């Protein structure tokens, strides 16, 4: 099929093939780069928040609890629980700052004392993954919700202090005020060094993903425009420097073939096309000389 095509058509098809291949490679590489950059950007926000919540937990455990130790022997104060403090601080942040309205923090637990911390089906799978892989210290990915995609960072919650079992071991050993507040059914039976849940921070990803997609479309659009301009420019240069001179030589050759020896092969360039025109001109001169000698021979024969 290509044999029947003109030179410009062949050249355009080749350029389009190169364009499509290049655009595919560039688009794939750009997509992977933007995807990684998007995840890093979202993850950096989540890591800052989750480390902040860990600082709140450490402050509550190391500074608040010792100050209220005597009082805790008489009554249960949820504000002295690191998980409770972290959750309350984060909720206060969400209420005060609109930009954090769609961020979520949860210490999802399989068997929590406070039922608001109970893990849902999705979070339960994350916890089971941590239980199945004790060496796994962190996992992160996207979660699809009705309000959009959320990027999450999850870390295992481990009972690493024996003091935790004072409230979460046996109900009979728990503070009476705790039983009165949360009951004697949930949040008990924990064991030392057991993974009981996951610390999870949810970061809204819709805005960042939308920006990444817009950047992807913009860059691909610019690259496509550049390729288009290159194709147009190459076609113009091809037509000016190759196709048009070849067409002129073809017309002159046709004139010469019917006996018009006044037609000239003009050499307008010093490139290969110019060399071809010069070669045709020499061929025309040789042809004229050959035809002259042939005419002279024919006259001599007629005179005899």
Image (tube, rainbow, N blue to C red):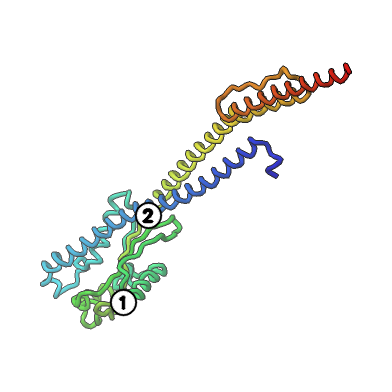
Secondary structure under tag 1 reads: loop
What residue lies at 43% left-to-right and 53% top-to-bottom?
Answer: 32
The picture quadrant where one finds residue 7 is top right
Residue under pointer 2: 39
- Considering only vertical position in the picture, is 260 above or below 160? above
Examine the rendering and report whether any part of residue 91 can be seen: no
Mark 1 = which residue? 186
What percent of the width, then of the height, locates residue 304? 89, 18
Q: Nearer the viewer, residue 191 or 183?
A: 191
Q: Secondary structure at mark 2?
A: helix
Left or right: where does residue 296 sit relative to residue 134?
right
- Residue in the image at 28% along x and 81% along y: 189
Q: CA distance from mark 2 to mark 1?
A: 36 Å
Question: In the image, is residue 199 above or below residue 186?
Answer: above
Q: Quadrant of residue 12?
A: top right
Front in this rendered view, residue 176 or 4: 4
- Quick check: marks 2 and 1 in contact, CB under 8 Å? no
Numbered circles on residues, count? 2
Image x and y of residue 43, in percent:
33, 56
The quarter in which the N terminus is drawn is top right
Point 45% across, 47% down: residue:
213
Q: How would you rate the neighbour count of disc 2 (Cα within 10 Å): few for under 14, some for 14-19, many for 20 or more?
A: some
Q: Position of residue 302 (x, y in %)?
A: 88, 18
153 relative to 214 in the view: left or right: left
Query: Which residue is nearer to you in this view: 232 or 138?
Result: 232
Q: Residue at x 70, y 42 (%)?
A: 3
- Identify which residue, 235 or 261, lies in the foreground: 261
Along the horizontal axis of the image, is 177 left or right of 43? Answer: left
- Give the mark nearest the N terminus, 2 or 1: 2
The numbered dot on residue 158 is none
- Tag nearer the camera, 2 or 1: 2
């Amino acid at each position: 099929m290509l044999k029947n095509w003109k030179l410009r058509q062949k050249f355009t098809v080749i350029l389009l093939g190169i364009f499509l291949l290049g655009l595919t490679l560039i688009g794939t590489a750009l997509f992977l780069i933007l995807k990684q950059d998007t995840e890093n950007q979202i993850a950096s926000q989540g890591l800052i928040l989750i480390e902040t919540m860990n600082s709140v937990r450490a402050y509550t455990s190391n500074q608040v609890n010792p100050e209220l130790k005597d009082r805790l022997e008489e009554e249960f104060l949820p504000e002295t629980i690191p998980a409770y403090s972290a959750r309350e601080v984060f909720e206060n942040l969400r209420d005060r700052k609109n930009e954090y309205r769609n961020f979520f923090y949860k210490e999802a637990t399989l068997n929590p004392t406070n039922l608001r911390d109970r893990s849902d089906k999705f979070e339960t799978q994350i916890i089971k993954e941590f239980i199945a892989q004790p060496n796994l210290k962190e996992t992160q990915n996207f979660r699809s919700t009705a309000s959009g995609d959320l990027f999450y960072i999850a870390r295992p919650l481990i009972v690493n202090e024996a003091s935790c079992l004072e409230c979460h071991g046996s109900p009979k050993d728990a503070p009476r005020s705790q039983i009165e507040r949360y009951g004697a059914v949930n949040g008990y039976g924990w064991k030392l060094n057991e993974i009981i849940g996951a610390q999870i921070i949810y970061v809204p990803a819709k805005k960042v993903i939308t920006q990444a997609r817009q950047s992807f479309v913009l860059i691909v659009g610019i690259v496509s425009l550049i390729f288009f301009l290159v194709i147009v420019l190459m076609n113009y240069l091809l037509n000016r420097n190759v196709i048009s001179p070849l067409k002129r030589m073809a017309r002159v050759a046709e004139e010469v073939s019917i006996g018009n020896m006044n037609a000239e092969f003009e050499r307008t360039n010093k490139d290969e096309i110019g060399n071809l025109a010069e070669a045709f001109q020499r061929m025309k001169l040789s042809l004229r000389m050959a035809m002259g000698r042939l005419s002279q021979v024919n006259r001599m024969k007629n005179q005899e």
